[in-house]
Amino acid sequence: MDAKTFVVVGGTSGLGLAVARQIGKDHRVAVLGDVPDEVSAVAAELGCTGLVCDVSLHEHVRAAFAEVVDRYGVIDGVVTCASVWAGGDLLELPPERIRRAVEVNALGTTYVLREALYHLHRQGFGNVVYTGAMAVVKARPGIPVYRATKSYGASLVESLAEAQHSNRIKVMQLHPGPMPTRLQERVGAEFLDEIYALPEQVASEVVRLLLLAPDDLYVSNELVLRADGRW
């Protein structure tokens, strides 16, 4: 199988890192993250391209995608896993935490999808996978801002998927439940379900979507729910 090129946004930890490890075994990977030391460490571990990118800044996202295209010519797929946690009662959340969640989870997702689709349209094919959260589907107390920002991403993907008018460019979304990741450590054990999937298990589903061929059956806006260990 010919090697393809994939961009993993938020690929330095958790689900993003698990995706990069799996798909990087047979394909070229560019990992994007906002902490330079973490990007360097993952690039060294996987032997892949590592790019420092704060997704809340459009110029960062545009430059990162342009560099990937400059190096490899095409982008076969993009998965966006970058996310900022904002848990707690709205009245207790510091304004700066609210702003950062909106900047990364909403604006950052918008910028990544904008640049991804620009390049996929230019070349005429490719897959995009948005990683949301089960919180979008089922409301949970204590996370109003986080849920709202992830719901924004889901709504954006639904509209973009319908706008492609071609199965050669697939825009899909996956909503995992809580997983034992670094983000989950920040969240706290009270938000971890009794039944859950490991990042490596959910990553397999992300990789399946990324590897869909342009002429595969119509799956744009395919929605994978309960990627959390349940049947």
Image (tube, rainbow, N blue to C red):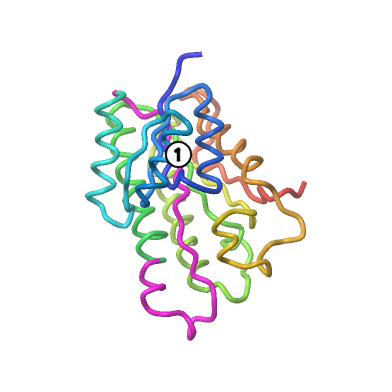
- For image coordinates 47% across by 31% down, the residue present is 46
Q: Judge by depth and name the residue closer to the eye, 171 or 32.
A: 32
Is residue 164 part of the magenta span, yes or no?
Answer: no
- Give the amino acid at mark 1: Val
Residue 151 falls left or right of residue 165:
right
Is residue 80 part of the magenta span, yes or no?
Answer: yes
In this rendering, the answer to whether 219 lies above or below 162 is above
**Residue 14 position within the rendered picture, expressed as x and y whole percent measured from the top left:** 55, 48
Q: Judge by depth and name the residue closer to the eye, 122 or 220.
A: 122
Q: Is mark 1 on a helix, strand or loop?
A: helix
Residue 74 lies in quadrant: top left
- For image coordinates 29% across by 46% down, the residue present is 61
Q: Which residue lies furthest to the bottom in this view?
A: 91
**How many C-alpha atoms fall within 10 Å of the one at disc 1: few (<14), some, or many (≥20)?**
many
Residue under label 1, please give it. Answer: 42
**Residue 145 position within the rendered picture, expressed as x and y whole percent measured from the top left:** 48, 72
In this rendering, the answer to whether 148 lies above or below 53 is below
**Residue 6 position within the rendered picture, expressed as x and y whole percent measured from the top left:** 42, 31
Q: What stretch is highlighted in magenta?
A: 73-100
- For image coordinates 48% across by 33% down, the residue present is 45
Residue 195 falls left or right of residue 86:
right
